[in-house]
Image: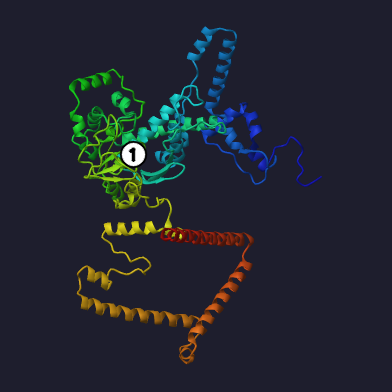
Amino acid sequence: MPKHYRPPGKKKEGNAAKYITRTKAVHYLQVSLSTFRKLCILKGIFPREPKKKVEGNHKTYYHMKDILFLAHEPLLEKFRDIRAHKKKVKKALARKNRELADRLLNREPTYKLDRLILERYPTFVDALRDLDDCLTMVHLFAALPAVEGERIQVERIHNCRRLSHEWQAYISRTHSLRKTFISVKGIYYQAEVEGQKITWLTPHALQQVLTDDVDFNVMLTFSEFYVALLGFVNFKLYHSINVKYPPILDPRLEALAAELYALCRYISAGSGRLSGDPQAVTSIEDGQREVEKTGTRTEESELRLAQLQHQLPANEPGALMHLMENADDMDDDDHEKKECRNLFRNFKIFLSREVPRESLLFVIPAFGGVVSWEGDGSPFKESDEDITHQIVDRPTQGHVFLSREYVQPQWVYDCINARIILPTEKYLVGRVPPPHLSPFVDNEAEGYIPEYAETIKRLQAAAKKQVLPMPGVESQGLDDPQTLLVEGIIDRTEANEAAEKKRKLTMLEKQYHDELNMELQGITYSTSLSNKNLQSSVENVKEDTMTTLEESEDLSKVSMSRKKRKLYEAMKIGQERKKDKIKLLKERKKNAEASKTG
């Protein structure tokens, strides 16, 4: 009898006991495959990869403890009740008992995900850390067409749009936005909330089409959980700045603008009472006082009566930015937040109808700017003489105001990423704008710095009153003679003397480094003096040194273990790929410059 023989029916050990296939898990829980998928998504249970797959490599495995965890889930009983209820409705309709079917449909069993959210995210910081995919999914569903009869319910799309606008209103009001980037997929945003960096992607404002090659049942399950999660997060964030949640919106402005930042004077007064700071005045309020003076007392009384009767819709998007303007400012000395709050502080920006309005209405107030758009419900009109910039994307304009600058939308995003006001010459209408650089890429770590990135770096240094070296020149200190001469600290004679001293010091330093290199290579001082062909000998020594280094590298690779040697080779391959990529970028730049000159 073999040593490890175990009679059939005995207790299993090892991977056979730790893991279970998906088919066996479905049979164990006595649910359908779709219900099992939904439970796993809501509970956050994912397939595992055991080292030894007992049932075969083509099967999906789950941890046995996770399946036992699902077996005791109260939500499982709710799903069984819903399935039994659907069978009763189907049976009543088959018997043509419409009265019973209607009565059953009015008493459909429901469930909530409150307990699951608290179970998966014990603290608020845990929820913020897992908010990237949540925001991306919610913004995706918010951009889908809300059409009756489609595979996605209209109410789900409206909820996603409302939650996404509430999130953007909070980020814009608290000036928490840090980075933006426009790509082919959509627009990337990164915000910092309570010390956590949150990055999400929003689709472009284009007509979305529901394709047949996507399983919307799985996406709807994810969106169901994410809608509940984002609702709790928004509730916590709004109460942290003393703003009532959910916000109450003005239906008249909703009908006019139907956008996130449709402004509402009644909500402005109401949020001031909520925050307890009626004298709090922000930059957006300063730019919209003229609009508030145009209302009548009759309209205000109608709105107040509607609020008392609870007739104002609390689940529609829009009018959220003005709601949060009077919230109490948090006492923080964060330099980065102050920098973001004051970037567009003195700017009054108007958006033309061809630009991405929703994105710009989000990012410009987040950095302290006052913004308006073309259409009814806007805070100020295009003819306002206080407008400093107008965002356009058309080659020609019907009427040009000389008191403002006409720039392309990319100028706003590049200013946000650079944290300075960039010159508008390269972004004027009709010109090809400079390359839109990603703020998520570390150019120094990649080894290649684009030309426009160097230009932005110099503009940033100039804004901070710093002195940077010229391109292609070694870094020099602030005590450079030419720098001191330009600043008027010394005269030209002293500058020439200082430059001569610096040249002699540089020569002595170079001689010192050469002698150290010769000493390391085994060349004595007397031999170097007697040798007439010193330069050639040094080059030969360098070649010998490189050969010695290569031989020592080969010896070290031989002494490595197999795992370490594979890791070392993979690291070398990665370095070579990075070098090839940098070389390709430089060649492309050279070809582009040659084509321009040619």
Dot 1 corresponds to which residue? 362
Q: Quadrant of residue 287?
A: top left
What residue do we see at 29% from left, 27% from top?
Answer: 253
Seen as rendered, the residue at the extreme right is: 1
Q: Can you say which quadrant of the picture contains the C terminus?
A: bottom left
Q: Position of residue 39 (x, y in %)?
A: 55, 30
What residue do we see at 32% from left, 60% from top?
Answer: 458
What residue do we see at 47% from left, 83% from top?
Answer: 519
Task: Tell me if I can see residue 248 in this picture.
Answer: no
Q: Position of residue 108 (x, y in %)?
A: 50, 17
Taking depth in this image into account, of 439 and 5 the one nearest to the observer is 439
Vertically, is 254 above or below 55?
A: above
Q: Position of residue 533 (x, y in %)?
A: 50, 88
Vertically, is 119 above or below 509?
A: above
Taking depth in this image into account, of 122 and 258 the one nearest to the observer is 258
Task: Locate residue 217 relative to residue 391 in the image: left or right.
Answer: right
- Residue kind at label 1, given as amino acid type: Phe
Task: Tell me if I can see residue 237 in this picture.
Answer: yes
Seen as rendered, the residue at the extreme front is: 598
Q: Can you say which quadrant of the picture contains the N terminus?
A: top right
Q: Position of residue 229 (x, y in %)?
A: 43, 33
Q: Quadrant of residue 257?
A: top left
Task: Locate residue 58 relative to residue 157 in the image: left or right.
Answer: right
Vertically, is 500 above or below 576?
A: below
Taking depth in this image into account, of 117 and 415 the one nearest to the observer is 415
Q: Quadrant of residue 315?
A: top left
